[in-house]
Amino acid sequence: MLTGIWNSVAGYVIIEIKGKGLERFLNRAIQGGVEIWRVRRTGTATVTARVSVAGFYALHTLVRGQNIRVRILEKRGLIMRLSKFRFRKVLLYGWVIVLALLVAASRRIWFIEVDGCDTVQEAEVIALLDEMEVRVGARRTAVPTSQLGNALMASDPRIAWAGAKLYGVTLRVSLQEAETIPELPSGEAGTPASIYAAKDGVITSITVYDGKAKVHAGDAVLAGQELITGVLRSDEEHTLLTRARGKVTAKVLYRLEATAGPTLVKLADTGETHESTRLGLFGWELLSTSFVSGAWEDAREEPLHSYALTNCFLPLTAEHVRLYALAERESAATQEELAQAALQKAERAMAKALPQDARILSKESGTVLLENGAVRATILVTAEENIGETKEIKEPNGEQD
């Protein structure tokens, strides 16, 4: 393997050997220490082979007095390629300089990527790194990646964890921000309360700021079940209460259905028509010969004539159109139209049912044709959301601490 690498760098030639007694000649060359390989017969008295540069010159000595002719077919290797530039010194020097610049550039940082930013802005992280003399253009060996994480956490309390790693000329910084504890509204701080499930679901995470967790990740819960209790301790004489605070996220399954048909309300021509002339400027309507409303607001238009008023200083246009009044009417619809209408209704119902902070994990939909010709659409959505709702604790019978 090392010999192959050396030949690729130092160079070798592909030769054609032609004449009588080829086998005897090749045996003498190999016994004489000539490095020759990939010998292939191409004719009754012709072979091709690969030989090192030194070996090629050695063959000239062996060829003397023999009825053998050696001809170069191709030159290969790095040295052979560079030899083409021996009369082009400027170009050769240019390649050397470019190679040197590339090597020097590969030892520095040219890109900084920051992942995991939410409340902490990427520009703030870049500024913190700059204070640590970690910036674009810095030497890779001068960047203490193992210490950057601790330095960032010490510099900003909003960063709970940070890590840095070098990927070539790119420094990638990953963050995990600290959980922000929400402030209680005024007047609620001293009111004992617990957190209950607002919906059925499977707990995915639970974070407790105050109180005690009653469930864990992976537990299935029902609506109304206590998730975080505000009762810290309770016995016959004393009860220690607090206002439970925390965040409980869970997977919640939604099933939404909507029906459309067997007919649909569509806009249809009433048979009434109206003609109007409009004056426009730069594509904007300036004036109209009639101001219509009601059934004419969504009227279907049919252009009749259009004119460009070229005699005016401004690019004015005039257009004469015929309007067809439209009105909503019950009309027959295809199964595809009914399915689309039913799905749109179900989508609108889903948008109303899902809270704004919900994250959709999966979504499936389907339609079925009913006996009366209508179509029912069903959408199944699995969403992850905060299901906790706070309820005040009723006064206990015992003495409260």
Image (cartoon, rainbow, N blue to C red):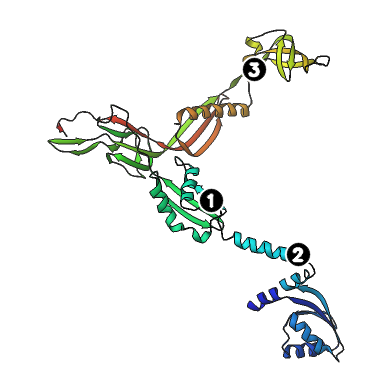
Cα distance between the residues tagged 1 and 2: 36 Å
Identify residue for label 2. 90
Q: Name the residue: 37% across, 39% down.
A: 180
* Residue 87 left/right relative to 232: right
Viewer-proximal residue among 248 and 185:
185
Q: Secondary structure at mark 1?
A: strand
**Sequence-wise first label, 1 or 2:** 2
Q: Is residue 119 visible?
A: yes
Q: Quadrant of the C terminus?
A: top left
Q: Earlier in the sequence, mark 1 or mark 3?
A: 1
Q: Amino acid at mark 3?
A: Leu
Residue tagged 1: 112
What number is the disc on residue 267? Answer: 3
- Callout 1 touching callout 3 (CB < 8 Å): no
Q: Where in the figure is residue 189, as x and y percent of width and height?
A: 27, 31
Distance Cα–Cα, label 2 vs label 3? 78 Å
Which of pointers 1 and 3 indicates the residue nearer the eye? 1
Instruction: State the image coordinates of residue 42 (x, y, percent, origin top left).
Output: 82, 78
User: Residue at the location (79% across, 86% down)?
Assistant: 59
Left or right of 108, for residue 199: left
Q: Secondary structure at mark 2?
A: helix
Sequence-first disc among 2 and 3? 2
At label 2, counting other C-alpha atoms closer than 10 Å, the crowd grade (few under 14, some 14-19, many 20 or more) is: few
Q: Amino acid at mark 1?
A: Ile
Q: Quadrant of residue 324?
A: top right
Helix, strand, or loop for circle 3? strand
Compared to 286, does 368 lie above or below? below
383 vs 10: above or below: above
- Determine if residue 1 is in view: no
Q: Amino acid at mark 2?
A: Val
